[in-house]
Image: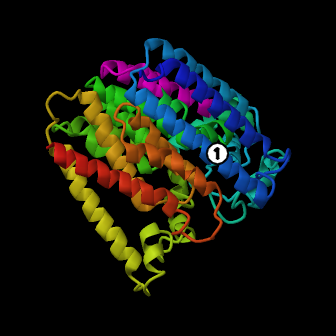
């Protein structure tokens, strides 16, 4: 008995993904800045979770049935169509994009965005009914976004000072990422239909097309950096990676993958030069150039340890010492430093394309760092889908999509509900490691 042909199967799964996405969108109450009610939010997450299941089946088809080149067209058509539908909707899972537009307006007025909170009377002339009322933390938090993001906000703001304009700009960043991924797949000799791993990811869809998170800019820059590194343009790769880091600091964790094989000084010097150049225009804010970042960790519970999944779980069993968060962070830092050193110094396995090794290392470093920090905002995990296209890993693919569950928090704590994401990820990682050792 022959298995179903991959192209018709993918078309059917794509239709299911589209129907579920539109069904989830229909649950939003028009005009509401959230889904609309706790019940609707729970139903929304349930429908999106089912779409993640459909997506995972599609990923399995792409990886195991070697789809024909003709599959690329339908895959991209669905990806573009769903993004256009979500682009035209107002953001309702996050209000972060209003801060992006605001920061662009502040810079258009010639003001350093790190100097004032949005509610500061000095910025009163900039307030408008379309953006200002929706800014979160407006009365106590200066912007948290690093300089590369601020430059982007300013440039987009010169074209369109609107939420839709900012979302469209983020989708253009995604388009850059997709084009880079297609070239990386071709360079690795892999089917280009694997772009589905990124393009159909429901968390990516909702995070970027609906809410327009700035992570899309980081994804676009990281994809460019990967392509430059795969083509042995080490200095350019280091410079672009530095730009991604100054969009959202987390991409710094993948730097060891870019210096593997002793390629250190050129990317390091280029990256440091970019960092200095991007920070320079904002240094009038002094130490305030870090914005809300120093306070953010406290707000998220990282200082007490309750913001970390593992410590939150242990706290249900024993009383944790006051230094538990510090101990956890030191242990994670030591383990990650050891892993980074290994990634940077080990030789690539024979018979595996350098592009695959690069993306595999990037996926490993990114997934472990993100899981260790375990932010409870879903969109922080979407970037993991990028390296998974070229070097797919079950644990990384799971972590790139399953956090759609974080759009609700039914138990108002950081262990039980997040465990539905981190538990399976840990099982998949251990299983993959056991298989690798067995094969060796």
- Relative to residue 265, is residue 47 drawn left or right? right
- Quadrant in which the N terminus is drawn: top left
Query: What color scheme is it?
Result: rainbow
Task: Say if residue 299 shows up in the picture.
Answer: yes
Residue nearest the observer in this picture, 376 or 26: 26
- Relative to residue 285, is residue 372 drawn left or right? left
Identify the residue shown where x is 46% and y is 49%.
Answer: 399
Q: Taking 155 as reference, is 394 above or below it?
A: below
Q: Is residue 181 magenta?
A: yes
Q: Taking 130 as reference, is 141 above or below it?
A: below
Horizontal and vertical percent position of residue 436: 21, 45
Identify the residue shown where x is 66% and y is 51%.
Answer: 45
Give the residue pinned by disc 1: 48
- Relative to residue 25, is residue 244 drawn left or right? left
Identify the residue shown where x is 41% and y is 54%.
Answer: 425
Extent of the magenta region: 168-195
Horizontal and vertical percent position of residue 14: 60, 27
């Amino acid at each position: 008995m022959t298995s179903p042909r991959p192209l018709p199967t993918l078309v059917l799964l794509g239709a299911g993904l589209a129907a579920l996405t539109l069904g989830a969108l229909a649950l939003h109450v028009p005009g509401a800045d959230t889904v609309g009610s706790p019940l609707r939010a729970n139903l929304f997450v349930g429908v999106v979770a089912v779409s993640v299941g459909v997506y995972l089946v599609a990923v399995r088809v792409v990886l195991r049935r070697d789809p024909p080149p003709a599959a690329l067209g339908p895959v991209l058509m669905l990806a573009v169509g769903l993004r256009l539908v979500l682009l035209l909707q107002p953001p309702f899972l996050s209000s972060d994009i209003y801060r992006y537009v605001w920061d662009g307006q502040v810079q258009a007025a010639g003001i350093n965005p790190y100097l004032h909170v949005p509610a500061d009377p000095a910025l009163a002339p900039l307030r408008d009914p379309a953006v200002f009322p929706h800014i979160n933390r407006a009365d106590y938090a200066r912007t948290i976004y690093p300089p590369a993001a601020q430059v982007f906000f300013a440039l987009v703001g010169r074209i369109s000072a609107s939420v839709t304009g900012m979302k469209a700009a983020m989708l253009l960043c995604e388009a850059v990422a997709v084009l880079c991924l297609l070239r990386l797949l071709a360079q690795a000799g892999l089917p280009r239909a694997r772009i589905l791993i990124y393009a159909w990811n429901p968390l990516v869809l909702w995070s970027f097309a609906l809410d327009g998170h700035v992570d899309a800019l980081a994804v676009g820059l990281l994809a460019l950096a990967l392509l430059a590194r795969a083509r042995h343009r080490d200095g350019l790769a280091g410079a672009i990676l530095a730009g991604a880091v100054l969009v959202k600091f987390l991409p710094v964790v993948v730097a060891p993958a870019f210096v593997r094989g002793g390629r250190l000084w050129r990317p390091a010097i280029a990256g440091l030069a970019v960092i200095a150049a991007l920070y320079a225009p904002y240094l009038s804010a002094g130490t305030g150039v870090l914005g809300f970042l120093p306070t953010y960790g406290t707000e998220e519970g990282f200082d007490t340890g309750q913001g970390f999944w593992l410590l939150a779980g242990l706290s249900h069993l024993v009383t944790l010492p006051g230094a538990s968060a510090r101990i956890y962070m030191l242990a994670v830092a030591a383990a990650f430093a050891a892993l980074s050193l290994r990634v940077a110094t080990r030789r690539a396995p024979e018979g595996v394309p350098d592009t695959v090794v690069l993306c595999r290392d990037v996926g490993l470093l990114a997934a472990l760092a993100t899981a260790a920090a375990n932010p409870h905002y879903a969109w922080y995990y979407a970037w993991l889908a990028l390296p998974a296209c070229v070097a797919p890993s079950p644990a990384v693919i799971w972590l790139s999509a399953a956090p759609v569950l974080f759009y609700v928090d039914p138990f108002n704590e950081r262990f039980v509900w997040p465990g539905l994401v981190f538990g399976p990820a840990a099982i998949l990682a251990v299983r993959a490691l056991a298989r690798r050792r067995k094969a060796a």
